[in-house]
Amino acid sequence: MLPEVNTDEEWDAVVPDEALVRPAAEDVCARLGLPGAALTRYAEGSQPVYAVGGDHVLKLYPGSAAEDGIREGRVLRHLHGRLPLRTPEVFSSGPYVRGWRYVLMSQLPGEDLALAWPRVPAAVRADLVAQAGEALAALHALDPAPLAPHLGPDDWHGFLAGQRAGAVARQRACGLPEEWIARIPAFLDTVELPAGPRRVLLHTEFMRQHLLVDPRTWRLTGLIDFEPAMIGDPAYDLVGVGLFVTRGEPGLMARFQQAYGASFDARQLLAHALLHVYSNFTWYFRELPMPAEQTWEAVAEAWFAAG
């Protein structure tokens, strides 16, 4: 029913094609005791994800992302009931056909915070950010040891060194102007990252798009999408906060860090943003407010400073 997907070209041809993917989703649901359930595909996200009726969510993982499915299922089982925000409960997970995998999980109440944000009253935004800070602090307070055999990287410093070696090429591939690219090595040279950071369970994409909110009460209701979870320095998770939660809005990063219970150096956070697996500063420069001074130091202050 579904073809193998092992390359980017196969992904682009298969994953968006509802004529191929929807029958497979219906087949998985039937095998799991949900025949004939109404399926609604979510528009956002890279993986095929469907609301199944009003209670379930089915997420499919092509062969090239099969490890993501295994990882997400393990992390969600580890987290269930342990955070101040709800995370999906896993009902079933496993292999499907031709390398594909699935996770059937609970559907959480609430609306995508990224979609709701324009309607959030200005006076409420700081409180929502504080709720997010408390949730991330709770995630980072959990003992990651039970997941350590299954989540990488084994060598955090080696991981960062590899990301640093590829930082210039990564931003050049994204189309960042050369005047910014030329200053990346010098900026990273001036930032000293912790020699022995506390290692915690990282979401790695802690952003509005993965937070759910009740628009009647403006309370956060859930945290989703743990497929790229890792174990590493807590500062790595603050990258998503600055870029996708607080987004340079005055006062919000300070409020987040206050609720989180720790402060972070803005230059270290920008360094982690340059080293992040999904780093794309061409996109960030289009989406976030740019400082008058066109330097990496000014960008760090504008996006990540808690002052």
Image: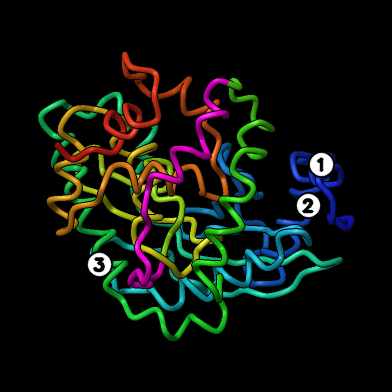
Position of residue 27 relative to residue 40, above or below, is: below
Amino acid type, mark 3: Ala
CA gap between label 2 and label 1 equals 7 Å
Q: Considering the numbered disc 1 on the image, is that residue within a helix, a strand or a loop?
A: helix
Q: Mark 1 packing: few (<14 Cα in 10 Å), some, or many (20+)?
A: few
Q: Is residue 200 one of those drawn in magenta?
A: yes
Q: Is residue 175 left or right of residue 242?
A: right
Q: Is residue 217 visible?
A: no
Q: Which residue is mark 1?
A: 19
The image position of residue 105, as x and y in percent, is 51, 65
- Which image quadrant for residue 262? bottom left
Q: Considering the numbered disc 2 on the image, is that residue within a helix, a strand or a loop?
A: helix
Q: Which residue is mark 2?
A: 23
Q: Is residue 136 one of those drawn in magenta?
A: no
Q: Residue at x 31, y 33 (%)?
A: 303
Q: Mark 3 packing: few (<14 Cα in 10 Å), some, or many (20+)?
A: some
Of 214 and 285, nearer the camera is: 285
- Which image quadrant for residue 152? bottom right
CA gap between label 1 and label 3 equals 41 Å
Check the image and name the residue furthest to the top.
Answer: 292
Tell me which segment is drawn in magenta: 179-201
Of 36 and 156, nearer the camera is: 156
The image position of residue 149, as x and y in percent, is 55, 84
Of 54 and 201, nearer the camera is: 201
Q: Which residue is mark 3?
A: 138
Q: Residue at x 35, y 63 (%)?
A: 194
The image position of residue 56, as x and y in percent, is 51, 60
Q: Considering the numbered disc 3 on the image, is that residue within a helix, a strand or a loop?
A: helix
